[in-house]
Amino acid sequence: MTTLSRKITSDMMDPTFETTLKNRLGEKGEKIPLCFQCGVCSGSCPVVFAMDYTPRQIMELIKLGVKELVLNSSTIWLCAACYSCSVRCPQGVDLKQVMETLKEIAIEDPKYSRDEKTFYEKFIDVVKKNGRMDEVALYVKLMPKSTVMRNLGFGFKLYQKGKINLRPVRSNAAGDVAKMFENVLSEEVQKQ
Ligand code: SF4
Ligand code: SF4
């Protein structure tokens, strides 16, 4: 976490950012301007300790139009979608939904790139393909080949102790999960 001490420059700004976000959120976006910076969201967030900006600070940055800091923050990727902020906000801001929409905007633009975003995308790839998480497949997707090769011996020891499964892990419901992803994506396309 940090205070907003970083110098904000004009190239980080997009005066239309709050409006764009509001429009994308539709009815749920109408409450964004009502945020009065009480900090209840930050006080309720179980993962705030790991975020670079607190949920309250993200709201402040949105209102200031500092798009670069918001979309490059770890906060949007670390949000656990627990809804604590949304149910407690005295102004009715659905901050969980704001975080989801910020993620969508960051995914659409490759210039916003950070490790948490890569992890998120690869995680979804594995679940989409296998119908469930496969830790070994995720590790191989995330790590450079040289690191995977260097750790082969350690991986084999973990396998011998039954800690990891070296065979691809695939759920019987993989087809249904893939269909679910397809349905959600086609709904998103129709909304645009
Ligand atoms: S709880 Fe609501 S009003 Fe308070 S800072 Fe968070 S978003 Fe703004
Ligand atoms: S929904 Fe996200 S931002 Fe809100 S309290 Fe939960 S983890 Fe924190």
Image: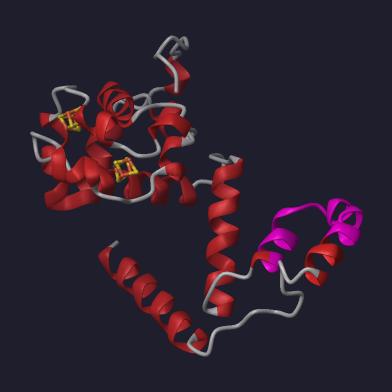
- The reply to whether the magenta stretch includes residue 150 is yes
Tell me: 72 left or right of 18.
Answer: right
Quarter containing the N terminus: top left
Where on the picture, by quarter, is residue 57? top left
Mark count: 0
| Residue at image location 39% in from the left, 30% down from the top | 67
Query: Is residue 19 placed above or below 100 in the rendered structure?
Result: above
| Residue at image location 91% in from the left, 60% down from the top | 153
Percent of width and height locating residue 161: 78, 68
Tell me: 139 left or right of 88.
Answer: right
| Residue at image location 47% in from the left, 12% down from the top | 6
Percent of width and height locating residue 20: 27, 41
Q: Which residues are magenta?
A: 136-154
Instruction: Please indicate, yes or no, whether residue 46 appears anywhere in the rendered image.
Output: yes
Q: Nearer the viewer, residue 183 or 142?
A: 142
Quarter of the displayed picture in which ligand 2 can be seen: top left
Percent of width and height locating residue 62: 29, 29
Please, which colouring scheme is shown? secondary structure
Where on the picture, by quarter, is residue 95? top left
Q: What secondary structure prevails in the magenta region?
A: helix
Tell me: 76 left or right of 162.
Answer: left
- The reply to whether the magenta stretch includes residue 99 is no
Tell me: 30 left or right of 23.
Answer: left
Q: Nearer the viewer, residue 166 or 76?
A: 166
Percent of width and height locating residue 183: 36, 78
| Residue at image location 45% in from the left, 13% down from the top | 9
